[in-house]
Amino acid sequence: MKRILDRLKMDYHNLQIKYKLFLLVSWIMVISFSFTFFGLQYAFHIYDEQIYSKSSQVLSTSSNSIESELKNLEELSYNILTDSQIQQYLSSISEDSTEYDKFRMRTNMLDRLTSYANKEEYIQSINLVDVNGEEYVVGPKTVKLTPTQKADITKMAMQANGSNVWLNPEKNDLLFSTAREIRQFRNLSFDNLGTIVIYINMDKLVANILEGSRKMDGEFLIVRDSNIIFPKETNSLFKEAAMSLDSEKVDSGYQIKKIDKKNYFLVHIKSNYFDWGYLNVIPFNQIFENINKVKTFLVIIFILMFVVVTIFGIRFARNITIPLENLVASMQYVKVGDFKEASRNALKTPIMQDDEVGKLQQNFQTMIQQIDELINENYSKQLTIKETEFKALQAQINPHFLYNTLESINWLAKGNGQTQISRMVEALGFLLRNSISLKQPLITIEEELNVVSNYVVIQKYRFEERLDFHMEVDSDIGGFYIPKLTLQPLVENAIHYALEPKIDPCKISVYSIVEKESIKLVVEDEGPGMESTFIEKLKRGEVKTRGQGVGLSNINDRIKLAYGEKYGIEIESEPNKGTKVIIVLPFDKGENHV
């Protein structure tokens, strides 16, 4: 069992977040519904008991009223058998009385019986049978006894020894009857004088009693030995309900029985006085219709809520997990170094929200871009450094031999009085020493200007009056640092592109512009100028320089490498209007960059 639980925990932990959220929402819904359902079931059970209590009270009140009336009938039968006129007449039957006296006493007796019959409207008939078997009948609807009935009732009354006997003749619909033996009280002889039988209309009796409590739902029944003794005519379903209830064995209470595929609520009470029970049969749907509607409505609402919550839960989970899934996929590309594809994959989900997931997505995209830029920048800088080192190494072929050779040429020129050759050789040696040495990648502006001056000295001997060179740099910035071989290649480019194609003199100027936060060194010429498209290619390094010189892109990259992206080279040029190459440097001594 523990292994199964551990396995389930492991499977749950390995699920995707959207499935975990879906399971969480589902469990919350199921638990909430379970609590609600069982709570309602308990409430319905309490409701059942309250309905039983109410129905039982109504049924008990009605049954007590019925039994009270039936007891009154017993008292009425006792009053009849003890009535002096009735006693006198029945006693005179066996005596030698005149016919007139018997007629008069008989008339008085019938009048007394009629007065008793009129006391209650539900009394149907009062039958008196004397010892000779003669029957006297009074009442609104008289009932004649057959000889067999007379014999049976008389026998039952005599066996009761003066007690009341309740009869339910099967052939007399809606009629109950009570019988009692009449005995002679004169001289306390207790001789048998006859039998009194009182027939009652049970339907009228029950109707009178229930008339004040017609709020009772369902059908009122009187049941004895699983048979309905009242009313005689009733619904077959109620008969089946009565047959399912054994009043002799089942105590008072309530039951819910299914009869003919329908549920019925049965409330039954045993009579405390008679051998029957009282039953109230209520169609279940009649009292529980609203409850069933509530149950059905609850189930439908839960299903709808579950569907709605599931749909919104899935959408909610997808809104959270889709960006995370894209981030995970992007991280896989980062793992193999494909930052372009990682950034493209992360951008598949637009950043709409400003929550934790949105911020995570924003930060991840920013991180990818920064890492990619740093890698490209570092790669470009490494290429620039390698290119500079390679070109410098090309110039380092046996430098001592080259220096000694130039020194020998210099002394030879001086010995022969060739001052121009001597000056050119000295300038060339200075240029070579500064270009070949890589010990310091940054030199002062003053040192760089000395390199430019020596380079111009050599070019002056070549171009003579055609090269109109001017240098006006603020002396206060001479101590600031600049990458080696920055100005000299620019002056060299100006000579190649502006001076050489022309026959007329060409002015080339080097000057400075000092601002609050930067220093600008400008190399300006009066050459043919350049198109804007050519300038863009030149910046990207797509145009090769003449000879083996250092290109503009190389210079620009080295400045950015030393000082940052905001510094470097700017080019201003228009066709036939010359060119300005502007070097932008930070306004500081530059010791931190050395």
Image (cartoon, helix red, strand yellow):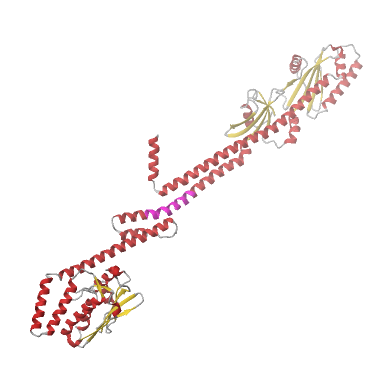
In the picture shown, does residue 456 fall above or below 354?
Answer: below
- Residue 366 painted magenta: no
- Residue appearing at x 44%, y 47% in the figure: 22
- Residue appearing at x 10%, y 83% in the figure: 414
Q: Is residue 142 visible?
A: no
User: Is 411 in front, or is 195?
Assistant: 411
- Residue appearing at x 33%, y 78% in the figure: 514
Relative to 482, 261 lies left or right: right
Relative to 592, 169 lies left or right: right
Q: Position of residue 443 (x, y in %)?
A: 24, 73
Quadrant placement of the C terminus: bottom left
Q: Locate residue 62: give its quadrant.
A: top right
Relative to 579, 284 lies left or right: right
- Residue appearing at x 85%, y 14% in the figure: 185
Q: Locate residue 142: give its quadrant.
A: top right
Residue segment shown in magenta? 309-326
Q: Is residue 300 visible?
A: yes
In the picture shown, does residue 293 fall above or below 237?
Answer: below
User: Is 337 in front, or is 563?
Assistant: 563
Q: Position of residue 371 (x, y in %)?
A: 32, 61
